[in-house]
Image: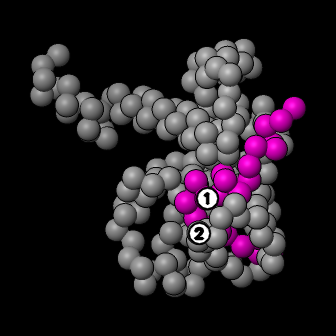
Amino acid sequence: MSRDDFFDNLFNEGAPAAEDIKLLRQQAYEERVIKYVFTECGIKPSSWGKLAVACRAATGQTKLHFDWFNGAYRRFPGKLVGKRIPYIHGIRLPELFKPAIKNKLVKAITKRLADFELDPGQDPYVFVFPLIKTKMCAHSLLTAGQELPAKDDSRFQFVLHIGGVKRPMYIEPLKNLCRAIGEQWAVE
């Protein structure tokens, strides 16, 4: 394979291997997010290899992934999911303050949640997405009026109330949410 063919296949969405590449990228993304959640929640596994072996024993896949995590750690406050949202970096600040029905970010997140078969109004979830170099999350861990305790006073959340839905959508850096959740969910 020539150099040009290699890069054409790598970046061409219509190439035969494009779906395989998307799958590999998603798997790598899921493993990075899971490791980040463990680390930021203050959990230091004795060995990442043991987690990979547990994942392989349970699912047959060698990389850590969201399905395994959600099955193995049922005490985590919501279902952990995530995906890259194309062109999210192009959303401007005024667009974030539009009503939920017209909000591009809410539409994109809701569409991705449907891919994972989650109802944003019913199911507690933590949807992780990258924004430039920051891992952000949208979550519905709280019903209206509740708060997760903050370990420090520097916590910032963007709260969206979607009409007729009991659970508002909170958007914040994943690091802040993980620190608020803590490590209790991983203790057996």
Comes first in the chain, label 1 or label 2 = 2
Q: Position of residue 45 (x, y in %)?
A: 68, 27
Residue segment shown in magenta: 165-188
Residue at 52% across, 85% down:
98
Residue at 12% across, 19% down:
2
Secondary structure under badge 2? loop
Q: Position of residue 140 (x, y in %)?
A: 72, 63
- The reply to whether discs 1 and 2 touch (Cβ–Cβ < 8 Å) is yes
- Disc number for residue 154: 2
Residue 90 in the image: above or below residue 144: above
Q: Residue most toward the right?
A: 188
Residue 68 in the image: above or below residue 146: above
Q: Residue most toward the front?
A: 152
Residue at 26% across, 38% down:
11
Q: Nearer the viewer, residue 128 or 83?
A: 128
Is residue 75 rendered magenta in the image?
Answer: no
Q: Amino acid at mark 1?
A: Asn
User: Which residue was labeled with disc 1?
Assistant: 176
Q: Amino acid at mark 2?
A: Ser
Number of disc labels: 2
Q: Nearer the viewer, residue 177 or 116?
A: 177
Q: Residues within 10 Å of mark 2 (few under 14, many from 20)?
A: few
Q: Residues within 10 Å of mark 1 (few under 14, many from 20)?
A: many
Secondary structure under badge 1? helix
Q: Is residue 39 visible?
A: yes
Q: Position of residue 3 (x, y in %)?
A: 13, 23
Residue 168 in the image: above or below residue 137: below
